[in-house]
Amino acid sequence: HALGLLRLAQHVEKAEGVSQEALESAKRMADEAYAERLRDIGLNAHDAELHDAYSSGVAPQVVRMRRVLHDHREKARERVWLKGRPNGELDESRIVDGLAGSSSIYKHRGPKPAGASGGGKRVSLRFVMDLSGSMYTFERLDGRKTRLLEVALFVMQALEGLESTYEWSMVGHSGTGPEAEQLVTWGEYPQGEHARLAMLKRMEAHTQFCHSGDKTFEASRRAIANVASREADERFVFIISDADLARYGLDPKEWSGILTSDASVGAYAILIASNEDEAARIHADLAPGRGHVCTDTSQLAVTFEKIFQASLSGDG
């Protein structure tokens, strides 16, 4: 009943004659229904079967992705920050030199000089998952919600055991808010099938009971700022989206500006809806290399491989 009221509110939200009080009441009822659903989610005897169903869709991609991550770690170790350069990213430790007139206050990544010592590399990754109502609404048409959950499981399985190099977190956004769900916080990773499936069910429930609206841009801004604050050698943000911007009048060019707003963070949009025309339009308006269309989970590993390779070559 609460879900029906929420969907009705979403349809009439822009219509005239609907009081703000009525809309807020519908949202409160949806929030209460969502809280009840979370209490009822408790895992049951079919959990292993359900987990395997999601896992089977991405198992080959997980194997390949783990190779990609291992290769990236080894290649990244061969590259270091070259400081005292006339161009590149501002080296904050040389700001005083810049005020004194020096132009060699920048740094960029390059091959490790002969004789330089090695050392472990730290990579920070933040995944921004689209938990908007369109994921739930259009699931029957193109399976985008299932694809979203498979991407989340793919991430969890691919990064398992690699946390000494790759620290990561995951947040979900919807009309409810740009950080409506703190799915995985830094350093606190889901362990085992039970924890992973519980998170997938939580994501699914959110798409069903969330408020209408789209917070993609603000979610992107916040994720980039969050990762920029991490102590790391490399920083990435991956925004998993169903490419449903036009419905909310959002301009992909504005998104492109957000994705390229911080030189210390590589931010990328991965578009997973089957509306390839809309995804292609968004992709065309994003800065080169910052948008990737991935309408099939069999493309996941190669998509991330392209991103990591570009980051090492300086093209990402």
Image (cartoon, grey):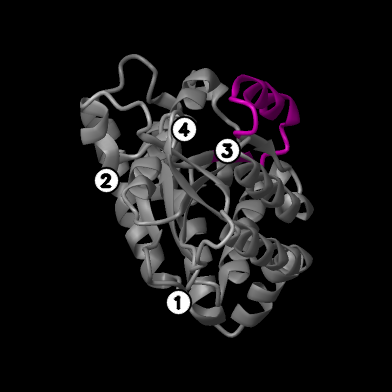
First reached walking from the N terminus: tag 4 or tag 2: 2
Q: What residue type is labelled 1?
A: Gly
Which callout, 4 or 2, points to the residue nearer the camera? 4
Q: Which amino acid does label 2 sit on?
A: Arg
Q: Which residue is tagged 2?
A: 28
Which callout, 3 or 2, points to the residue nearer the camera? 3
Dot 1 surroundings within 10 Å: few (below 14), some, or many (20 or more)?
Answer: few
Q: What residue type is labelled 3?
A: Ala
Q: Distance between the residues labelled 2 and 1?
A: 23 Å
Which callout, 1 or 3, points to the residue nearer the camera? 3
**Mark 2 residue element:** helix
> Looking at the image, do the residues carrying marks 4 and 2 touch, with CB atoms under 8 Å apart?
no
> Looking at the image, do the residues carrying marks 1 and 3 touch, with CB atoms under 8 Å apart?
no
**Mark 4 residue element:** loop
The quarter of the picture where residue 124 lies is bottom left
Along the viewing direction, whichever of 202 and 303 lies nearer the viewer = 303
Q: Which residue is tagged 4?
A: 88
**Mark 3 residue element:** strand
Q: Which residue lies furthest to the bottom in this view?
A: 45
Residue depicted at x 52% and y 19%: 253
Q: Does the magenta stretch include residue 284?
A: yes
First reached walking from the N terminus: tag 1 or tag 3: 1
First reached walking from the N terminus: tag 4 or tag 1: 1
Q: Which residue is tagged 1?
A: 42
Q: What residue span does the magenta drawing correspond to?
A: 268-290
Question: In this orientation, does residue 30 appear?
Answer: no
Name the side, left or right, on which 149 lies relative to 35. right
Along the viewing direction, whichever of 28 and 229 lies nearer the viewer = 229
